[in-house]
Amino acid sequence: MKYRVQPAAYVPLQDAHDALLLIGNQALRQRMGMPGFQYRYDLGEEWQAWTGLPCVFSRWMVHKDVDPKAKALLQDTLYVGLEEGVNALYGLSDPREDLLMLPRDIVAYIQGLRYYIGSAEQRAIDRFRSYLNQLDDE
């Protein structure tokens, strides 16, 4: 929608290509760019700048028929685990060579992530869905 780019074809990474999508640790390692590629775009940054909304990359979901106590336990476990994980990052002193990141950069990155769906996140999901519907109509 924003750039009106229409890929001619999707090809395996080993084939000649004009652009590529990196995710996870590989994207973190290349976050400053890659040799041979003039431009670098962060999908989350682009979405936020374009819409003013957070980018929702994924969503935790459970079946409706799951016991409410089990759902609450899962939710508590996720939040506690995330909080403990971020707290543990403050104890790191060595850089993560596999990510080419210093501990302070990892903490800043992790703290920028949201692990809940609030009203802004739901508006972002709805906006994304409306853009997909517009593409289907073209």
Image: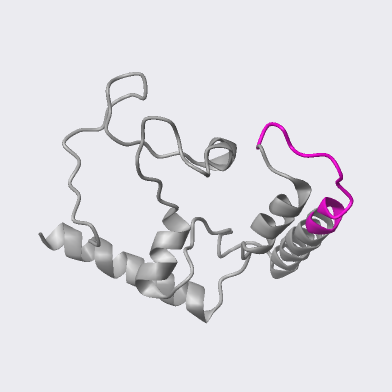
Furthest residue in direction right, as rendered:
91
Furthest residue in direction left, as rendered:
138
- Of residue 5 and residue 71, the one placed in the foreground of this image is 5
Residue 89 left/right relative to 108: right
Q: Is residue 138 magenta?
A: no
Question: Residue 63 location in percent, x, y?
Answer: 56, 59
Give the prevailing secondary structure in the magenta stretch: loop
Question: Residue 132 location in percent, x, y?
Answer: 26, 61
Figure check: 100 above or below 47: above
Figure check: 34 above or below 102: above
Question: Residue 26 location in percent, x, y?
Answer: 55, 35
Point out the image quarter for the C terminus.
bottom left
Q: Based on the displayed image, in which of its 4 quarters is residue 126 positioned?
A: bottom left
**Residue at (77, 48) in percent of width and height:** 103
Q: Based on the displayed image, in which of its 4 quarters is residue 62 positioned?
A: bottom right
Furthest residue in direction top, as rendered:
14
Q: Is residue 87 magenta?
A: yes
The magenta stretch is: 86-99
**Residue at (56, 71) in percent of width and height:** 117
Point out the image quarter for the N terminus.
bottom left
Question: Residue 24 location in percent, x, y?
Answer: 56, 41
